[in-house]
Amino acid sequence: MLTKVSLFCLMALVWVASWGEAAGEAPPSSPAAETRRASHEPLWAGAAKEEITPTERVYLAGFGPNRASRGVHDPLHARALVLKQGEVTIGLVVLDLLGLWGDDVRRIKRGAKEILGDRLIVASTHDHSAPDLIGAWGPSLLGLGLLPYRSGVDRDYLRLLRRKVVSSLRAAHRNLREARLKFASTQVDGVSVNIRDRSRLDKELVALRVEAAPGGETIATLINFACHAEVLWSNNRLVTADFPGYLCRKVEEELGGTALFFNAALGGMVTANVARDSRGKELHTFAEAERIGHTLARAAVEALRSGQPAVDPELSWKSAELAIPFENWRYRWARRFGILKRKLDDGRLRTEVAVVGIGPGQMVTVPGEPLPNLGWELKKMMGGPYKFVLGLAGDELGYILDEQDFSKRRYAYERSMSVSRQTWPIVYRALKGLLQEQEAGHPIAR
């Protein structure tokens, strides 16, 4: 007969095997919960950023529990862009975090509702050296880095973060001015690698430059590329924005304005292709984070120099609320013990997806970490030449796999870090419907 202590130790061993380095029919949902389309009125844009670096010790998200910070190497930011055309106002904000639960995204949306309504995308760069806001990486038993016995979330920091994100959006809204757009895409070799399947690697970088009209000075630059932000490895204890921080600072240095990096289909397992030393050991250093960030920045800047201006661009928004079964027994166990705090409705998570049309560009949001093949599926459905897949947007539901991959031994880790095997079918159907509705209403410029 198991004692309480032995039972707890057994559960700890199972937990260690499941928490790693990264972190059916859908119920009634609301397809096209909101549809807005502007006429060809002038486009306005504003951008701002707010520092969100923690001032106290925090538990760092990713890799394993009990990774308490020991200082700050470089700052974290919330980077916001607001676009307005006629009655349509859309906000995009990206945070230097591993991820943010949908419950907290909805609180941020309520704070910005006065200026944006519900038309807001909140995404994370998937930074593995930022505060744990999911809960899975808190203090562990005996400090051994095994099982967290409580959530790693600093509630005071989380409340401050939400206020600062709303503040960045309000500042971006105050900065609105007439704007014009330029799009570009390019292939970037040697920066990323898929350690599960090297044949599955989307090397496309898609970029949008928002310029003042007239004048031409940069308001914002949006970059979309797939790669885990984990150049700094599990032994790092300093808060850092990792390569996305270097990327954004370099783009801002070259072009001005505010740079925003949105991760793409980075799941299963697309990570940084770091250099090795003379003994073949991987270099998980700040110098490598800088090299990779600057490589992506140079690729984006160079592509945008010969980018395509958008002629009379039209702005549109469509979204759908979804409910995803909360099937992962490890997550359910962690929620039961208060380690993960997430609201459920009849055993399901509320989340959402959105489609943004902007001239020849189209954006889709995915509430987690889709595998590269799923990103390709979405791009095939999208119209126009510039296709942005915004991962970790609106939520962090872990890895998102199709039915075939969900059953493969190769993806055992990703499966253990996925909310449900039903996530992809539900997300796919919703986005397909929204894209079809957008195409029927007014095709994306080609």
Image: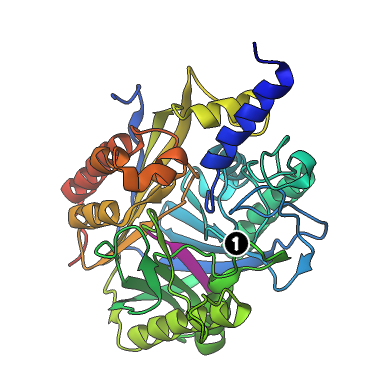
Which quadrant holds residue 235? bottom right
Task: Name the residue beneath numbered marker 1.
Answer: 96
Q: Residue sitting at 46 percent across and 81 percent down?
A: 297
Figure check: 194 above or below 374: below
Q: Is residue 263 magenta?
A: yes
Q: Residue sitting at 43 percent across and 74 percent down?
A: 273
> Of 175 and 366, which appears nearest the observer?
366
Most common SS among magenta residues: strand
Position of residue 374 measured from the top left corner of the image (x, y, whole percent):
27, 51
State the count of labels: 1
Which quadrant holds residue 258? bottom right
Can residue 175 be seen here?
Answer: no
Task: Identify which amino acid the numbered label 1 is placed on.
Answer: Asp
Position of residue 200 measured from the top left corner of the image (x, y, whole percent):
27, 61
Can residue 35 be seen here?
Answer: yes
> Of 215 and 171, which appears nearest the observer?
171
Figure check: 274 above or below 265: below
Q: Residue furthest top?
A: 1
Side of 130 relative to 365 (left or right): right
Which stretch is magenta?
259-264
> Of 33 and 216, which appears nearest the observer?
33
Quadrant position of the C terminus in the picture: bottom left
